[in-house]
Amino acid sequence: MELQNSFIVPADIDTAWKTLLDVESIAPCMPGATLTSFTGEEFTASVKVKLGPVTQNFNGEGKFTKRDEASHTAVIEASGKEIRGGGSASALITAVLVSEGPNSTRADVTTELTITGKVAQFGKGVITDVSKKLIDQFANNLQAVIASRSAAESAAPGEVVAAPVIQTADSIDLLGSAGAPVLKRLVPVVIGLVIVVGVVWWLIAR
């Protein structure tokens, strides 16, 4: 299935691009996802998902298949699999930055998502809702990073600027993202979506 997501970065396209290149600043913006390795065009990542009192761990991998810095476009193939269990998801992701004005850049993310197992029974509406919530949280945190950076650049000498307030966690709470009726069966989809959103910017930055 195809998923379309967009969010606005409150900066010109060059500033937005440079911010996305700053891996240390944007890494905490995505809850639950950690890039564990990147060599050449391939990467591995881990994801923690909280299901009530239980935390589950997942592994993901992928590769960068295209990057066009001039058009601010990247294409990535990514997949995720539960460490213990048969849940899995794979995706082909195209991410594009588009200038919306002197202080606004739109990020468009198109995901071709392939799901195997019981989770494939879910409709597009549920999966779209989960992906939107994850991307919205990532976007809000990214905006906080950019706002803090802009304040620091315009601050008077010696003025202390507060660090950005990032609303994130070391794991994804499925109770807050999907709702109780679809929790465990949605885990494979969440793996794929988190890896898509969290790792795409790491790859663009290379």
Image (cartoon, helix red, strand yellow):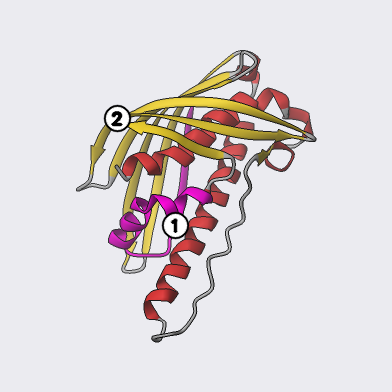
Which residue is most to the left?
Answer: 70
- Residue at figure coordinates x 41%, y 41% from the top left: 109
Displayed quadrant of residue 204: top left
Q: Magenta span covers which residues?
A: 1-28
- The picture places residue 178, in percent across and down from the top left corner, at 69, 37
- Nearest the camera: 12 or 6? 12
- Residue at figure coordinates x 39%, y 86% from the top left: 157
Displayed quadrant of residue 44: top left
- The picture places residue 23, in percent across and down from the top left corner, at 39, 49
- Mark 2: secondary structure: loop
Q: Relative to residue 41, is residue 204 depicted above or below?
A: below
Separation of marks 2 and 1 at Cα, in angstroms: 27 Å
Displayed quadrant of residue 165: bottom right
Residue 165 circle label: none
Q: Relative to residue 51, is residue 154 depicted above or below?
A: below
- Residue at figure coordinates x 26%, y 32% from the top left: 66
Report crowding for label 1: few under 14, some 14 to 19, many 20 or more residues within 10 A (C-alpha). many
- Nearest the camera: 57 or 133? 57
Q: Which residue is mark 2?
A: 41
Q: Amino acid at mark 1?
A: Ile
| 177 relative to 151 in the view: left or right | right
- Mark 1: secondary structure: strand
Q: Which residue is mark 1?
A: 8
Q: Quadrant of the C terminus?
A: top left
Q: Relative to residue 105, is residue 71 depicted above or below?
A: above
Is residue 131 visible to us here? yes
- The picture places residue 168, in percent across and down from the top left corner, at 61, 51
- The picture places residue 190, in percent across and down from the top left corner, at 59, 31
